Image: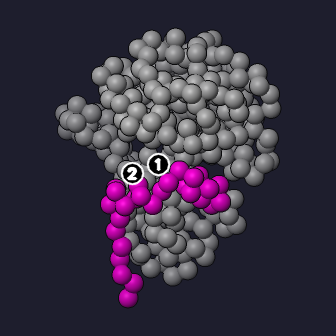
Amino acid sequence: MTELRFFDGAAVAAALPWDALIASIEEVVLAEGAFAPERTVHSVPVPGGDDGALLLKPGWVIGDVIAVKVVTFFPDNGALSLPTVNAGVVLFDGNTGVFLGACDGNELTTRRTAAASAVAAKRLARADARRLLVVGTGALSPMTARAHASVREYDEIVIWGRDANKAVAVAGELMLDGITVQVNEDLDDAVAQADTITCVTGSTSPLVKGALLRPGTHVDLIGAFTPQMRETDDDVVRRATVFVDTYDDGILAGDLAQPLESGLITTDDLASDLRGLVAGDHPGRTSDEEITMFKSAGFALEDVAAANLVFGT
């Protein structure tokens, strides 16, 4: 009988260094027999508070493994000093269906989400990008900074958050890695100076203004995953060549769902998904002046790639 294995957050972190995780994602999204069905999302009422959400995200590689991530999003948790997102990943043998075990999904999710953005940034951020702006101060903020810094040699990372104290805390954490970091409380000023911008917020109104983007800027959007959530305005979408992690899920987030609904863009304006970028079906950035945008809504094959490393399959 197969012995069940469980990996806590520390074990997951140790198993997912950036170079290995990025390579695993690139390998799995191209693997023959890799498949990720449409995610399901359920609303969960919370007495006296905003509704939570339950997401189920399965994915598998035929003849290898089946992974299912179960995620909760409870927007009021910040006031309780609890994570707004909580997750676990369960793994099954792809040949027999035998349950192999489970691992902490919070650490896995933050790392694989950040790594997926780095996979895209390898192909979309300018090779000479030197200033990275991180918009947001949650758990993904330092992770995303580290992931982006693993694929580009940034001279400086800038942190912006609605709460300046939280931004200072993120900057302090990154400084322990020997990274040059500063906090800018003026978001418009930070956007206008950035070469790469990564957004990791739960905002329901645009934060980044497209009119402020310099030619050649790469904009990475992670936080929004519902039609009501949005981190950028119409000008970003209008000016950028737009890429998504997956076509089906990418257009569900407000940064694309709203411009699609208004007719500003159509699905024909989406240049490529992550698989097409990795495969080379699309060349990625085509000039130093091009503004690029990558919208990530979460891709179950990224979870499969990370779980493979954690379990050593």
Q: Is residue 106 left or right of residue 157?
A: left
The reply to whether the magenta stretch includes residue 14 is: yes
Q: Quadrant of the N terminus?
A: bottom left
The reply to whether the magenta stretch includes residue 253 is: no
Label 1, label 2: how far apart the Cα atoms are: 6 Å
Does dot 1 land on a helix, a strand or a loop?
helix
Q: Is residue 175 above or below residue 32?
A: above
Query: Label 1 is placed on what type of residue?
Result: Arg
Per the image, the residue denoted by label 2 is 107
Query: Label 2 is placed on what type of residue?
Result: Glu
Q: Is residue 57 above or below residue 199?
A: below
Q: Is residue 131 above or below residue 252?
A: above
Q: Which image quadrant for residue 191? A: top right
Q: Which residue is nearer to you in this view: 57 or 313?
A: 313
Labelled disc at residue 111: 1
**Rendering coords of residue 129 (x, y %):** 65, 28
- Can residue 135 be seen here? The reply is no
> Magenta span covers which residues?
1-29
